[in-house]
Image (tube, rainbow, N blue to C red):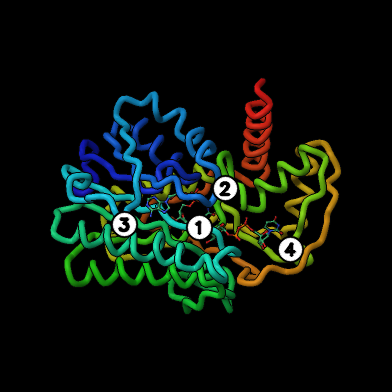
Amino acid sequence: VSGSPRARALVTGAAGFVGSHLAEALAAAGRDVVGIDSFSDTYPAAVKERNLARLSASPGFRLVRGDLVDLPLAPLLDGVGAVYHLAARAGVRASWGAEFDRYTHDNLLATQRLLEAARDLRLERFVYASSSSVYGDARELPVTEEAPTEPVSPYGATKLTAEHLGRIYHRSYGVPFVSLRLFTVYGPRQRPDMAFHRFVRAVAAGEPVEVYGDGAQTRDFTYVGDAVAAFVAAGAAEGVVGEVINVGGGVRIALRDAIEMIGEIAGRAPRVSTRPKARGDAAHTLASIRKAERLLGYRPATPLVEGLREELRWVREQAGFSAGR
Ligand code: NAD
Ligand code: UGA
């Protein structure tokens, strides 16, 4: 039955950055899609409404507004074949201090509740959006799925714990859980707290970009279209249940070199303003994507320069939108 294209898909976090793109891709492939989103306060609801604009024209898509912790989930899971669980509080640097209860609520309680609701159903797949942050400062790069998991941020600790919950519900109840460890996803609709969104917007506006630390940190950046392709494949492929799989772009770049690239694309020399290094940031990330290639037929298709062009185009469109043009 795995991946039967007619079964309904449930996408949590469907009004968010990655979730809205995934829901669009599933709906475009002819799937019935139910989206759930709480419109949590990490960034403005109006931005999430815009993320949903294209989906609302899709006859197979329905959005349920509410919190996974409070919603009656059984009726929402009725007739669902695959769950794609992307709802979370996703900021790394905001996860210190008083906000942490929001991370336990959105990343742990919400996940536990969804797994409980799924445990006695005959789901085909439960795909979880995990994170490179579970590795922390990896000792060897590229990092493979067998590397030790030693998060360096409270956020990373919640993503790893949620992944353990999935593994536990798989082991004890047979929930068909698969975990995709995403590496810094970017592109149109990227969250406003994330580096490229802020950098592209600043350069386009002729304002300085704020760099945390010396800009020598490196990241494996993943274009959102590639991440979506990995989710779609993980919802359908045989032989992935119980696995954790890295999803990266397959190359890494220093932040300061990425800023140069943004300047070249925007046709404007970036000005840099240096801020203290952020606590909880991994110094370097790079995914080994061999397992994704093998199990998902995954192959990143969008090089950084092209993906950044798409993000710049989108930021300019949004600027036009806010100015009422
Ligand atoms: P996002 O904030 O844009 O989307 C998450 C959505 O989940 C939001 O719209 C939010 O309102 C919703 N949500 C949060 N808590 C909820 C709850 N309790 N009930 C219902 N809805 C809730 O974030 P994103 O960048 O699209 O990230 C999506 C997922 O991918 C997250 O799980 C994140 O941890 C993971 N991830 C993201 C990246 C990245 O670079 N963006 C990298 C690795 C992993
Ligand atoms: C991203 C996502 O935000 C997380 O949700 C996700 O779990 C994580 O990727 C992952 O790979 O698992 P991060 O790598 O911190 O986290 O993504 P960015 O916000 O794009 O930051 C990249 C680098 O730029 C970091 O070193 C950050 O400190 C830096 N940065 C960010 C700045 O220098 N200036 C800024 O204004 C923002």
The circle drawn on residue 191 is 2
Which of pointers 4 and 2 lies earlier in the amino acid sequence? 2
Q: Where is residue 34 in the image (x, y as percent from the top left)?
A: 29, 39
Of pointers 1 and 4, the one earlier in the residue sequence: 1
Residue at numbered disc 3: 69
Picture quarter containing residue 56?
Answer: top left
**Amino acid, disc 2:** Arg
Looking at the rendered image, the quarter that the C terminus falls into is top right
* Image point (37%, 66%), residue name: 108
Q: Is residue 4 left or right of residue 158?
A: left
Image coordinates of residue 263 in percent, x first then y, are: 80, 43
Which quarter of the rendered image does ligand 2 occupy? Answer: bottom right
Instruction: Determine the CA span between mark 3 and mark 2.
Output: 23 Å
Mark number displayed over residue 90: 1
Q: Earlier in the sequence, mark 3 or mark 2?
A: 3
Residue 316 vertical placement versus 43 (above, below): above
Crowd class of label 1 (few under 14; some 14 to 19; many from 20; radius 10 Å): many
The residue that disc 4 covers is: 212
Q: Does the residue labelled 1 lie within 8 Å of ligand 2?
A: yes
| SS under mark 4 | strand
Residue 195 as seen in the image, left or right of residue 54: right
| Amino acid type at image mark 1 | Ala
Label 4 residue near ligand 2, CB within 8 Å? yes
Pick whichever, 274 or 47, lies toward us: 47
* Label 2 close to label 1 by CB (< 8 Å): yes
Give the Cα distance between marks 2 and 1.
9 Å
* Mark sitting earlier along the chain (3/1): 3
Label 1, label 4: how far apart the Cα atoms are: 18 Å
- Point out residue 269 in the picture as x, y percentages from the top left corner: 86, 43
Task: Compare marks 4 and 3 and give the one earlier in the sequence.
Answer: 3
Q: Is mark 3 within 8 Å of ligand 1?
A: yes
